[in-house]
Amino acid sequence: MTRIGVILGSTRPGRNGEKVARWVMDAVSRRDDAEFELIDLADYPLPHLDEPLPPSMGQYSNPHTHQWAATIAAFDGFIFVTPEYNHSTSGVLKNAIDYLFAEWNNKAMGVVSYGAVGGARAAEHLRLIAGELKMADVRTNVALSMFTDFVNFSELAPGGHQLQALTTLVDEVIAWSNALAPLRAVTAAA
């Protein structure tokens, strides 16, 4: 069964990302075409990148990196839940991504973003990062506006069109994760 990790990319106290991630997990819980697991970065307190060698070498030295690598390696694709901070993704998510290389390769990714303009710039930055990590980013982006998809900027109340977009995004992530499986198999066999 295809395994998709839903990565909650914010660790701020009172974060809206937790509500968004729960909304995603609730929507995918009714599906039977893949397994989904929430990966909360608050459960992986990674320091600022502290590996002496570049991640592309795959020679990790720290226990926290080995744990993080094992977590990410277990999935076939990802849905990143990200806020937009200063026209980009969160620092904690960027740091977590930067720790690894091969564990991201040949996997699909989609983005559920939120912010004043739906987190669109954070999503675009994640797409650029994904390309460098040999990930396939799907076209659909769920962009939740703090003005129209939240009440008082804190209570998630997405419109029906957002659930439809999320369904399309998940369909695409699963399809691309399955399509990339032969490439992951070749890499694993090498």
Image (cartoon, grey):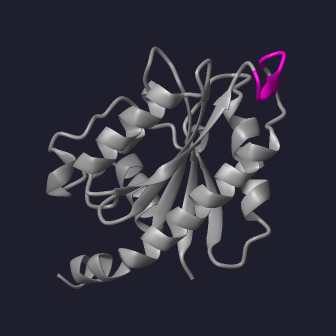
Q: Position of residue 56 (x, y in %)?
A: 17, 52
Q: Is residue 14 above or below residue 3?
A: above
Q: Is residue 71 above or below residue 2?
A: above
User: Is residue 12 found left or right of 156 in the rendered image?
Assistant: left
Return the residue nearer the eye: 77 or 11.
77
Q: Position of residue 77 (x, y in %)?
A: 47, 63
| Number of marks present in the image shown | 0
Quadrant where the C terminus sits is bottom left
Q: Would residue 152 be counted in the magenta stretch?
A: yes
Q: Kindly indicate the quadrant of the structure image that contains residue 31.
A: bottom right
Q: Residue at x 27, y 49 (%)?
A: 131
Q: Residue at x 74, y 18 (%)?
A: 147
User: Is residue 160 found left or right of 35 in the rendered image?
Assistant: right
Q: Would residue 159 be counted in the magenta stretch?
A: no
User: Is residue 118 found left or right of 62 in the rendered image?
Assistant: right
| Residue, far front | 161
Stretch of the chain drawn in magenta: 148-153
Q: Position of residue 38 (x, y in %)?
A: 64, 54
User: Is residue 174 found left or right of 153 in the rendered image?
Assistant: left
Return the residue nearer the eye: 189 or 111.
111
| Residue 15 in sight in this render | yes
Q: Is residue 190 above or below residue 130?
A: below
Q: Residue at x 37, y 33 (%)?
A: 125
